[in-house]
Image: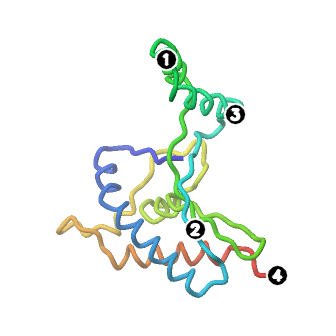
Amino acid sequence: MTPKFATRLDWQQAELLMQPALIRVIDNIRKNLERSPWRGDYEDVQRWPSHTPPEVQAQVIALQHELETAEPERSILIQQTLDHLPRPYPGYELKLTQGDREARLDIWNLCYQVCFMDYEVNHPDRPAVVIDTSLINFEDQEVDWQRLDDKAKQLVDAAFSHLPAAS
């Protein structure tokens, strides 16, 4: 689920932090993979708003495919229908494999955990996120790269420590 922001300032601070967080999360994943028996592959995935029933997801996907080749009149009707249905949003995952075992890490969720205080994934009544302002040097409005890297390392290390143990 994408985060909600209480103020424009929160949005701007998140914009400042997200790209550096992604860089540090990916780098710390690389370091963990180098010393791990797991193999990792990144995948773009589609996420659905919580509580979107599978039949609605299937309907949206079918309509999106139909829209690609539909006649102009039919396209208008399809688009009007789609405008009233939930839409998937892009996700980014690390698919981990070890023999016949598989695990997945949600990269955006890890980045959100780095950037925000006490970020909980899949919390349906989650209020607006709270930016972890300790990651910003307010004197020059720059990212505190050392703190950001320390937090990203801690979160990625924790995610790898929770992977299933080798058989």
Which of label 1 and label 3 is nearer to you?
A: 1
Task: Assign a secondary structure to mark 3.
Answer: loop
Q: Taking 24 as reference, is 105 above or below it?
A: above
Q: Residue 77, percent across and down?
A: 51, 14
Callout 1 amino acid: Glu
Disc 3 designates what residue? Answer: 53
* Crowd rating for badge 2 (residues with CA inside 10 Å; few <14, some 14–19, many 20+): few
Q: Taking 119 as reference, is 99 above or below it?
A: below
Task: Assign a secondary structure to mark 4.
Answer: loop
Q: Does label 1 or label 3 sit earlier along the sequence?
A: 3
Which of label 4 and label 2 is nearer to you?
A: 2
- Residue 167 circle label: 4
Q: Does label 4 or label 2 sit earlier along the sequence?
A: 2
Which of label 2 and label 3 is nearer to you?
A: 2
Q: Residue at x 56, y 46 (%)?
A: 46
Cα separation between marks 4 and 2: 21 Å
- Asked whether the beta carbons under mark 4 and mark 2 sit within 8 Å of each other, the answer is no
Cα separation between marks 2 and 3: 28 Å
* Crowd rating for badge 1 (residues with CA inside 10 Å; few <14, some 14–19, many 20+): few
- Residue 41 circle label: 2
Cα separation between marks 3 and 4: 36 Å
- Residue 71 circle label: 1
Q: Does label 2 or label 1 sit earlier along the sequence?
A: 2
